[in-house]
Amino acid sequence: MRQIINISLPEQMAKMVEREVKKRNFASTSEYIRYLIRSNELISDIEQSRKEFAEGKGKILKSLKDLG
């Protein structure tokens, strides 16, 4: 189920969003915003993984079987 969320943007930012939607061939502004949110979530996941690896919590895989 989808929920509609309305946001207010400054004119310059709204124009930038419109340009990016056209430039990247997104079907709609909503699709572009979903893309940005997913990208942000992915970046957060990568940063968390880097932090865990730096803390010594990483695991060296010898094969794909080690993923399980």
Image (cartoon, rainbow, N blue to C red):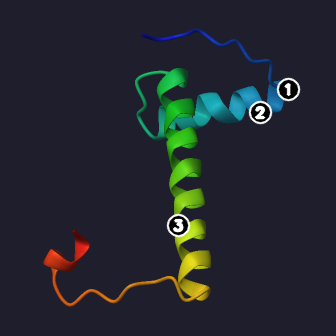
Kindly identify the amino acid type of the residue bearing the numbered disc 1: Pro
The kind of secondary structure element at disc 3 is: helix
Please report contact status of discs 1 and 2: CB closer than 8 Å, yes or no. yes
Mark 3: few/some/many CA within 10 Å (<14, 14-19, 20+): few
Q: Which residue is mark 1?
A: 10
Q: Earlier in the sequence, mark 3 or mark 2?
A: 2
Question: Which of the two residues, 12 or 43, is positioned nearer the viewer here?
Answer: 43
Q: Which residue is mark 3?
A: 46
* For residue 10, side relative to residue 14 (left or right): right
Quadrant of the image containing the C terminus: bottom left
Question: Which of the two residues, 31 or 45, is positioned nearer the viewer here?
Answer: 45
Question: Which of the two residues, 68 or 4, is positioned nearer the viewer here?
Answer: 68
- The residue positioned 46% from the left and 83% from the top of the image is 58
Kindly identify the amino acid type of the residue bearing the numbered disc 2: Met
- The residue positioned 52% from the left and 71% from the top of the image is 49
- The residue positioned 42% from the left and 10% from the top of the image is 1
Question: Does 7 sit above or below residue 14?
Answer: above
Q: In front of the other: label 3 or label 2?
A: 3
The kind of secondary structure element at disc 2 is: helix
* Place of residue 47 in the rendered image (x, y in percent of width and height, measured from the top left): 60, 68
Q: CA distance from mark 3 to mark 2?
A: 27 Å
- Which label sits on residue 65? none
Q: CA distance from mark 1 to mark 2?
A: 5 Å
Question: Does 42 sit above or below residue 52?
Answer: above
* Place of residue 63 in the rendered image (x, y in percent of width and height, measured from the top left): 16, 84
Q: Which residue is mark 2?
A: 13
